[in-house]
Amino acid sequence: MVLCGIDEAGRGPLAGPVVAAALILPVGIQIDTINDSKKLSEKKRRQLDAQIREQALSFGIGLADEQEIENLNILQATFLAMKRAVDALAVKPGYLLVDGRDFPRFIYKGQPLHGEALIKGDSKSAVIAGASILAKVYRDALMLRYADKFPGYGFERHKGYGTKAHREKILELGPCPIHRKTFLRKILNNRQ
């Protein structure tokens, strides 16, 4: 059976897209030190990202941008990113493992896919952990590009998360086009 792990990065930030990765590894492959991306240093994540991409049978990246997050809500936008990641696979997955408690409906080339949600899956499954690394590294690189496009917010440091420095810059500069407006309501309402 072709097992596919799916995870996302960027559900909680105030800015930028939510990014999902779908990963299929060859049966029996071992990638040392693979773990939940949040438990790895940035340097280690980048090293593992290159190794995973090289050894993967297939992987796909999908994202939902800030406008889709606003229109759908973060959960549905996350599901959309996951579906796009699965659609980008070159190999049809036989069974999906999704990190989290919810399992959305997946269709691959017109065929429904089966699987399950696995709470803390990125700590329990190497294929989910690998997907978490791919999603995180991709999103971090995207946020670095946004740091150049929208200077002053510090995206290169906090990657869009709601740090004190980021919240202060939002109040000072106002939101930029990649900010999630509904995520900023509390911050902007407290300013008045």
Image (cartoon, grey):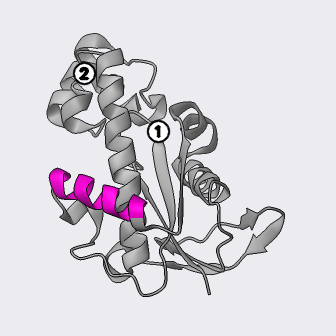
Residue displayed at 36% across by 70% down: 129
Residue 160 among those drawn in magenta? no
Residue displayed at 16% across by 34% down: 164
The answer to whether one can see residue 192 in this image is: no
Q: Secondary structure at mark 1?
A: loop
Q: Residue under label 2, please give it.
A: 153
**Hey, which residue is sitting farthest right in the picture?**
110
Residue nearest the observer in this picture, 127 or 98: 127
Q: Horizontal and vertical percent for residue 95?
A: 62, 80
**Hey, which residue is sitting farthest top in the picture?**
173
Residue range highlighted in magenta: 42-54
Residue nearest the observer in this picture, 70 or 130: 130
Residue 49 among those drawn in magenta? yes
Q: Amino acid at mark 1?
A: Pro
Whether residue 57 sits left or right of residue 139 in the image: it is right
Q: Secondary structure at mark 2?
A: loop
Q: Amino acid at mark 2?
A: Tyr
Indicate whether 39 appears above or below 120: above
Q: Horizontal and vertical percent for residue 192?
A: 30, 17
Quadrant for residue 156, please give it.
top left
Label at residue 17: 1
Residue nearest the observer in this picture, 156 or 71: 156
**Quadrant of image for the N terminus:** bottom right
